[in-house]
C-alpha cells in the first residue's frame, strides 16, 4: 500500500485519506480522472495525459485546481514520496463539495485527490498465452471522449468479463461495431497488414497510449486506419490487441472463447509493446501525444 495520498492541498497517510460526503464526485460522479504511468521514476506520455485532463475539465466546465506547473510538481512529489519507480499515478478532480443539488453550485472549489500504485512494466509479454476478452453491449453515455469518473457501465462490463474468465470486456455498439475495451482501446491487424482502431470521436475515450502507438507504428511504415470494426472482423484478423497506460499493448488471443488467428500472440503486438516501452524509457513526450 502506498504511504501517502494527496488530498486537496495536503499529503496525508493513505489510510487516513478521506473526502467529504457531499463531494459531487461521490454524489453525482461529477468529475474526471487520469492515470499516468511511471517508468523509472518518470511519467510516460505526461503531456498527452495532462492535455486530455484539461480537455475533460473544460468539457464539464470544472475549474482546474491549479496551474499545469503546480499540478506537475504535486504529481512528482507524490511519486517521490511513495518511492514509485515503476507503477502509476491516479488523479481525480471533481467539482468539489456543495449541498446536494443537480445544478452546478454558484460557488465551489474543485477537489483533487491523487494516489499511486507500484506495478512492474516489462517490454516482454506478461504471459505467452495473451489475454482473452468477452464482448458485451456498450451501454454507456454519449460523451465517452470525456474521461469521466462515471464508470458504472465499465464496472459491469469488467465484472461480466471476470466472471467469464476474461481479462477485458470489449464493448459493442448497436450496429455490431466494437467501440473499445472497458479500460483500454481495441485494435486489430488485418490479413493485409493494416492496423485498425476506431476513430477518436465521442464514442470512445481518446487513448493516449494508443495515440503514441499509432505514431510509433507509422514511424515503422505500418499503415493505420481509423475506423470501426466488428467482432467477426476481429476473429478473422491476423492479430488483435489492446492498449492502455497500465497495460501498454497486450495481445488478445481469444474473443468470447474463440481463438484469434492461431490463438497465439502475434509479432505486431510484441513489436509495438517493445516500441512503446522504449519510447516510455526515453522520457520524451511525443509531439503526437495529443491532440492528434
Ligand atoms: N478506453 C477506456 C474506456 C479507458 O478507460 C482507457 C484507460 O483507462 C483507455 C481507453 C486507454 O486510455 P489510455 O491509453 O490513455 O490509458
Image (cartoon, helix red, strand yellow):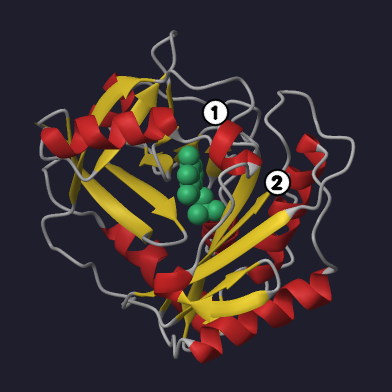
Q: Nearer the viewer, mark 2 or mark 1?
A: 2
> Furthest residue to the top?
175
Q: Is residue 10 left or right of residue 137?
A: right
Mark 2 → mark 1, Cα distance in angstroms: 40 Å
Q: Residue at x 81, y 56 (%)?
A: 64
Secondary structure type for disc 2: loop
Q: Residue at x 57, y 82 (%)?
A: 78
Earlier sequence position, callout 2 versus callout 1: 2
For disc 2, the neighbor class at 10 Å (few under 14, some 14 to 19, many from 20) is many
Q: Is residue 218 positioned above or below 88 on the image?
A: above
Secondary structure type for disc 1: loop
Q: Is residue 104 positioned above or below 39 on the image?
A: above
Which of the two residues, 277 or 104, is positioned nearer the viewer here? 104
Q: Is residue 289 visible?
A: no
Q: Residue at x 88, y 42 (%)?
A: 107
Percent position of residue 150, x then y? 53, 35
Which of the two residues, 274 or 284, is positioned nearer the viewer here? 284
Instruction: Check the picture and name the quadrant holding the N terminus.
Output: bottom left
Percent position of residue 50, x then y? 71, 62
The circle on residue 124 is: none
Mark 2 CB in 8 Å range of ligand 1?
A: no
Q: Is residue 74 positioned above or below 259 on the image?
A: below
Percent position of residue 208, x then y? 59, 55
Which of the two residues, 59 or 40, is positioned nearer the viewer here? 59
Q: Circle 2 sits on which residue?
A: 97
Percent position of residue 130, x then y? 18, 54
The circle on residue 227 is: 1
Give the number of callouts: 2
Amino acid at each position: 500500500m502506498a504511504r501517502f495520498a494527496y488530498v486537496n492541498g495536503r499529503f496525508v497517510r493513505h489510510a487516513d485519506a478521506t473526502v467529504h460526503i457531499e463531494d459531487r464526485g461521490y454524489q453525482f460522479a461529477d468529475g474526471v480522472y487520469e492515470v499516468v504511468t511511471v517508468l523509472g521514476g518518470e511519467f510516460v506520455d505526461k503531456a498527452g495525459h495532462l492535455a486530455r485532463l484539461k480537455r475533460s475539465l473544460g468539457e464539464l466546465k470544472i475549474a482546474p485546481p491549479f496551474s499545469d506547473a503546480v499540478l506537475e510538481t504535486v504529481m512528482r512529489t507524490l511519486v517521490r514520496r511513495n518511492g514509485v519507480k515503476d507503477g502509476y499515478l491516479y488523479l481525480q478532480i471533481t467539482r468539489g463539495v456543495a449541498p446536494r443539488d443537480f445544478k452546478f453550485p454558484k460557488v465551489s472549489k474543485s477537489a483533487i485527490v491523487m494516489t499511486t500504485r507500484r506495478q512492474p512494466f516489462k517490454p516482454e509479454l506478461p504471459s505467452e498465452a495473451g489475454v482473452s476478452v468477452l464482448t458485451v453491449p456498450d451501454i454507456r453515455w454519449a460523451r465517452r471522449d470525456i474521461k469521466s469518473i462515471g464508470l458504472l457501465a465499465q464496472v459491469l462490463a469488467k465484472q461480466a468479463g471476470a466472471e467469464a474468465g476474461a481479462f477485458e470486456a470489449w464493448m459493442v455498439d448497436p450496429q455490431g461495431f466494437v467501440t473499445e475495451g472497458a479500460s483500454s482501446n481495441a485494435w486489430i491487424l488485418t490479413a493485409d497488414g493494416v492496423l485498425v482502431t476506431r476513430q477518436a470521436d465521442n464514442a470512445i475515450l481518446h487513448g493516449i497510449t494508443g495515440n503514441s502507438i499509432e505514431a510509433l507504428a507509422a514511424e515503422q511504415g505500418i499503415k493505420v486506419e481509423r475506423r470501426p470494426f466488428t467482432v467477426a472482423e476481429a476473429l478473422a484478423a491476423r492479430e488483435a490487441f489492446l492498449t492502455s497506460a497500465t497495460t501498454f499493448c497486450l495481445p488478445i488471443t481469444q474473443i468470447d472463447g474463440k481463438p484469434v488467428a492461431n490463438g497465439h500472440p502475434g509479432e505486431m503486438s510484441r513489436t509495438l509493446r517493445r516500441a512503446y516501452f522504449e519510447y516510455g524509457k526515453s522520457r520524451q513526450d511525443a509531439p503526437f501525444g495529443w491532440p492528434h
